[in-house]
Amino acid sequence: MSYGRITGWATNLPERVLTNDDLAEMVDTSDEWITARSGIKSRHIDGTVTEMSAIAGRAAMAMAGVDADQVDLLLLATTTADQQFPASASVVQHELGLTCGAVDMNAACSGFVYGLVTAMQFMNGSVDRILLIGADALSGIVDWTDRGTCVLFGDGAGAVVLERTGDEPSLLGWDLMSDGSAADILYCDHGGTIVMHGKEVFRRAVMAMTDSATNAIARAGVTADDISIVVPHQANVRIIEASLKRLGIPMERTAIVLGHTGNTSAASIPLALVDAIDNDRIAPGDLVLMVGFGAGMSSAAAVLRWDPPAS
Ligand code: UT7
């Protein structure tokens, strides 16, 4: 029996950078306020989901040494597909020369973890290789006159290749949640812009992150002390601090990139994961806790034993 594991990874951020000072020229805000309330200093904008996904996906496949005709499934977690239809996954599939099935998944900012858990279920069956991408272009649906939201969001993509080549299970525990009764506190209508009740989202986010992470850790049969690094959704550093405090995990054990990415929704966890890998913060055998929350309200957590192929 072989198990699914991550064998390739890559990210993409669009070129254009928007700093807090740039925003201060657009709305009544300041670098000081944005930094203190969110931890964000700058974000990348003007990306498209298909373009960023194709770049990150191609690089992740190259790293894994996987050819286009070897990929069995493309899962694209996004809440900002380029068009209402077709799915952006179909466009990315063609761009990468894949011949497999391709589908968009929308679980908002929890999308990448939902996608990871879904991909791992396929790998428990007979699927050998999956390309999983988390990508969002939130700059296209932000109301640039609303200082309560426009300072928070950005664009980006992160991709991983999963292959059924592990000797032991990699996904040890997971949790997927949704509370549709809170669907009206964070939403975007077709053709509209992001509407957010920030304080309520903040309050629920801390509870959802803590609950999902606690469930995934328990199902993995480990404790918070066993977690080597937390890769949380990058919405607000204060949300991460409050959640980790409740979980009893120190901030030194967290991957944070939101300072230069802002909140990139489904891309935020793979962006932080790849940053942690690139900075040698994750070693083989380490337990990685990924935990996200977002519109829905959705939340999702996964405890992954890091099992990269020997280099
Ligand atoms: O993926 C999930 C997506 N969303 C989130 O995770 C967001 C969750 N919420 C948050 O991160 C925080 O609630 C915010 C960062 C959005 C806001 O922080 P806060 O500490 O909750 O501030 P607040 O909404 O209570 O606003 C405090 C003050 C208000 O002024 P008054 O009423 O005290 O005079 C706001 O009008 O700050 C004002 N304000 C701003 N001031 C300068 C709101 N936005 C800004 C701004 N610049 N950009």
Image: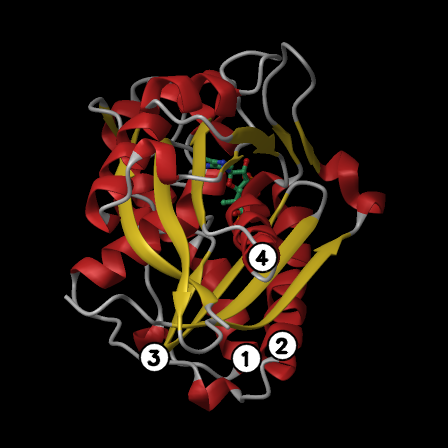
Q: Amino acid at mark 4?
A: Val
Cα distance between the residues tagged 2 and 3? 18 Å
Q: Nearer the viewer, residue 292 or 7?
A: 7
C-beta proximity under 8 Å, tags 1 and 2: yes
Query: Would residue 136 appear left or right of 217 to someone viewing this image?
Result: left
Q: Secondary structure at mark 4?
A: helix
Query: Would residue 116 appear left or right of 204 to someone viewing this image?
Result: left
Q: Residues within 10 Å of mark 1 (few under 14, many from 20)?
A: some
Q: Nearer the viewer, mark 2 or mark 3?
A: 3
Mark with earlier residue (1, 3): 1
Mark with earlier residue (4, 1): 4
Mark with earlier residue (4, 3): 4
Q: Residue at x 55, y 11 (%)?
A: 83
Q: Residue at x 63, y 41 (%)?
A: 107
- Residue matched to label 1: 247
C-beta proximity under 8 Å, tags 2 and 3: no
Residue 264 in the image, given as x and y percentages of width and height: 42, 38
Mark with earlier residue (1, 2): 2
- Residue matched to label 3: 286
Q: Amino acid at mark 1?
A: Leu
